[in-house]
Image (cartoon, rainbow, N blue to C red):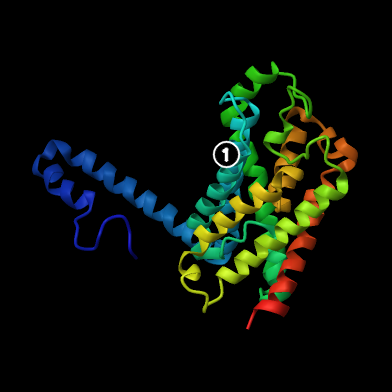
Amino acid sequence: MTGWISSSSSTILDETEPLLLADGTNQPMFDQRKRHHKIIDKVKLMGRKYRTSYREYLAEFIGTCVLIILICGASAEQILHVEPNKSWLTSSIGSGLAVLIAICIVGHVSGAHINPAVTLTFYCYSGFPGRKVPGFLAAQFLGAFAGAAILYAVISPAIDEFDHGERQILGPLGTAAIFATYPPLYVQRYSSVLSEIIGTALLLLVIMATGHQNNLPFRNAQGCFIAVGIVSISLSLGYTSGFSLNPARDVGPRLFIALAGWGSGVFTVRDYYFLVPMLAPLLGGFIGGLIYTVFIDQ
């Protein structure tokens, strides 16, 4: 197995062993280090046995967790006025980079769906095994919840400074939009629904097209082009819906903040708006997959 140290290099233990044994006074320290390495090896062995059965699901959990930490962290930078001027460009680039990093970490293990809309579209059109769908969806929603919890632990002092400890959903001191998506007040519901459907359809077109084996050079750098596609979609359509395109990205963190002090209003506000980012991306993914399969795929 390839590790951080090449096979031709000596390990740290190999290099220190002669020095430790050269002086009898170091013998207890050497024995302690040997026991330490045995414990680590045992933990790694147990982890790998568990991983063989759940590796893809763990990858989806970790990938979605990383996605939420980064994408909601970029949102926090905008909402908490870390910089004097807000910029949708900053949020869009942050979203694209967050997806790219998540793909880099887990793409080689699970394909980095990190999005229920992607998983269900692949099930419908690309032969993704149905037996894996429930596990992937559960891992994505749980990963999103965990990512929101981790980010909150980091930025809660900044939130307290901004809203003086009184959690508000909307308004000048509203902070729920750090974790969940809400459209501007002037945007009507149908506009947000169309934004999520069309945006997710475009996202699936990008994913399926760049993943085709004959589509070079895009296939060799698929993650980069998906990230570029997300930035472009966000800049063009995202401001009308708050930009989710991913049910796990919205519902997981929304559930966390409901438990963390914002209350159940995060689900009921704006006439139960949470249903839009939960359901519209699923329809958009289905439409995007249908367009690709019928009109583009060979």
Question: x%, y% of residue 179?
Answer: 69, 38
Categorize mark 1 by other alpha carbons within 10 Å: few (<14), some (14-19), many (20+). Answer: some
Please tell me which residue is depicted at 56% across the width and 69% down the height of the picture. 210
Q: Hey, which residue is sitting farthest left in the picture?
A: 22
The residue pinned by badge 1 equals: 90
Q: Where's the N terminus, which quadrant? A: bottom left
Question: How many numbered discs, if any?
Answer: 1
Q: Hey, which residue is sitting farthest front in the picture?
A: 236
Question: x%, y% of residue 291?
Answer: 73, 73
Answer with left or right where residue 97 lies relative to residue 38. Answer: right
Please tell me which residue is depicted at 9% across the width and 43% down the height of the picture. 22
| Pick the front one: 188 or 140 | 188
Residue type at the position of mark 1? Thr
Question: x%, y% of residue 25?
Answer: 14, 36
Any part of residue 243 in sight: no
Any part of residue 207 in sight: yes
